[in-house]
Image (spheres, helix red, strand yellow):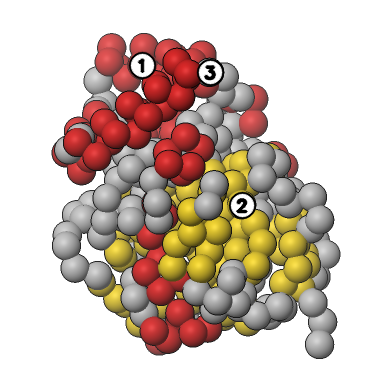
C-alpha cells in the first residue's frame, strides 16, 4: 500500500513539472501520422494494451484507418448504441465511468476526497451561466483510452453559447482527480450551453495530458491553439438544434465530460453512482414534470 501511495504521489507531482501543452502537441502530431509502418504497429499495441473492442466499430479493421486519431475517434455501428426512446429520458453523452453525480452545493461541485471546484471558474467566469447552474445537478463522466470518444446529446437542445477556457492539462484519471484540487476548473476545456426541454444544459469537455484537440460538430477543432485568454461565441443566431443522441463533438484522445442542469428539473437514476460504467444513449436520468 505504501509503495502504491508513493508511486501515485510521484505521478501527480511530476505532472506539475512536465511541459503539458508541449507533450500534447507532440501527441497531436503523432496521432495524425499517415506512415503505415509506424501507425499500424502502434494501433495494434494500443488495442491489446487497452483491450479495445473492435466488433462494435463501423470499420473493424484497424489498418483501414488513415491515422491513429481516426482510429481513436472511430464511428460505431448504428445498432451498437441504442438511444433510450422515452420522452423524459436523459441519456449518457458518452461511454465512460461515473466519477461523481449529485447536486451542486451553491457554486461548489464535488470532485473527490474533499475537493470541490467552482461552477463560476468551470464555466469561464461567465456570471450569466454561473447564476443559471447554481444549486443545479451535475455528473462527471471519465473516458478511459479504450472507450468510444465521440460525444452525443443527452437531450434535444438548441445551442446558445460556446466558451473556450485555456488552462493546464493534468491527467484526469482517478489518481490525479483525487489529488489535484480544483482539477476540472484548472484544465483546458470547452463549455457548450444548450436550451432544452429541461431548461439550460451545459456540456463541458475537459482536456487532459495527451488530448491533442477538442472539437464540436458546428465549429470544428477549437483547441489547439490553446491561447491564454477565454474565448466566447454567442451562437443563438445559428438556430442550431441537435437531437437527443446526435453527435455534438469529440475528444482527439480521451478525457472527461461534465454535464450540468439548472435547478431540479432533472433527477439522476438512483444507480448513477461513482464507478458505474455507462454507455452512450443509456438512460442516466429523467426530466421532472411541472
- Residue 167 shown left or right of residue 283 in the figure: left
Q: Which residue is mark 3?
A: 1
The tag earlier along the polypeptide, 2 or 1, is: 1
Query: Which residue does the image show at 36% across and 12% down from the upper left?
Result: 41
Q: Above or below — where is 151 with respect to 165?
A: above
Select label 3 or label 2 by which is in front: 3
Q: Which residue is mark 2?
A: 100
Query: Which residue does the image show at 48% across and 54% down from the upper left?
Result: 115
Query: Between residues 150 and 102, which one lies in front from this camera angle?
Result: 102
Q: Secondary structure at mark 1?
A: helix
Q: Secondary structure at mark 2?
A: strand
Residue 267 visible at all: yes
Q: Above or below — where is 288 with respect to 171?
A: below
Q: Which mark is residue 42?
A: 1
Q: Secondary structure at mark 3?
A: loop
Q: Which mark is residue 127?
A: none
Q: Above or below — where is 76 with respect to 263?
A: above
Q: Residues within 10 Å of mark 2 (few under 14, many from 20)?
A: many
Query: Which residue does the image show at 58% across and 71% down from the upper left?
Result: 105
**Horizontal and vertical percent position of residue 17:** 19, 36
- Can you tell which quarter of the image residue 289 is in? bottom right
Query: Between residues 3 and 106, which one lies in front from this camera angle?
Result: 3
Amino acid at each position: 500500500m505504501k509503495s502504491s501511495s508513493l508511486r501515485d504521489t510521484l505521478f501527480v507531482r511530476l505532472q506539475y513539472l512536465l511541459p503539458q501543452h508541449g507533450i500534447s502537441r507532440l501527441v497531436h502530431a503523432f496521432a495524425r501520422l499517415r506512415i503505415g509502418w509506424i501507425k499500424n504497429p502502434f494501433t495494434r499495441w494500443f488495442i491489446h494494451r487497452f483491450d479495445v473492442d473492435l466488433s462494435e466499430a463501423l470499420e473493424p479493421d484497424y489498418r483501414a484507418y488513415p491515422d491513429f486519431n481516426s482510429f481513436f475517434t472511430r464511428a460505431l455501428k448504428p445498432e451498437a448504441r441504442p438511444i433510450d426512446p422515452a420522452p423524459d429520458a436523459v441519456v449518457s453523452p458518452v461511454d465512460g465511468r461515473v466519477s461523481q453525480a449529485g447536486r451542486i452545493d451553491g457554486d461548489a461541485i464535488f470532485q473527490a476526497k474533499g475537493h470541490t471546484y467552482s461552477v463560476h471558474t468551470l464555466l469561464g467566469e461567465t456570471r450569466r451561466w454561473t447564476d443559471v447552474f447554481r444549486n443545479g445537478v451535475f455528473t462527471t463522466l471519465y473516458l478511459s483510452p479504450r472507450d468510444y470518444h465521440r460525444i452525443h446529446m443527452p437531450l434535444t437542445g438548441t445551442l446558445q453559447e460556446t466558451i473556450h477556457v485555456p488552462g493546464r492539462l493534468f491527467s484526469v484519471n482517478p489518481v490525479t482527480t483525487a489529488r489535484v484540487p480544483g482539477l476540472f476548473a484548472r484544465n483546458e476545456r470547452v463549455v457548450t450551453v444548450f436550451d432544452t426541454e429541461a431548461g439550460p444544459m451545459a456540456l463541458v469537455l475537459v482536456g487532459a495530458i495527451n488530448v491533442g484537440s477538442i472539437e464540436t460538430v458546428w465549429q470544428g477543432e477549437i483547441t489547439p491553439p490553446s491561447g491564454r485568454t477565454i474565448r466566447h461565441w454567442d451562437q443563438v443566431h445559428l438556430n442550431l438544434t441537435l437531437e437527443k443522441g446526435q453527435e455534438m463533438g469529440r475528444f482527439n484522445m480521451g478525457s472527461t465530460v461534465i454535464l450540468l442542469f439548472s435547478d431540479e428539473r432533472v433527477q439522476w437514476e438512483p444507480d448513477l453512482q461513482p464507478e458505474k460504467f455507462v454507455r452512450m444513449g443509456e438512460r442516466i436520468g429523467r426530466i421532472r414534470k411541472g
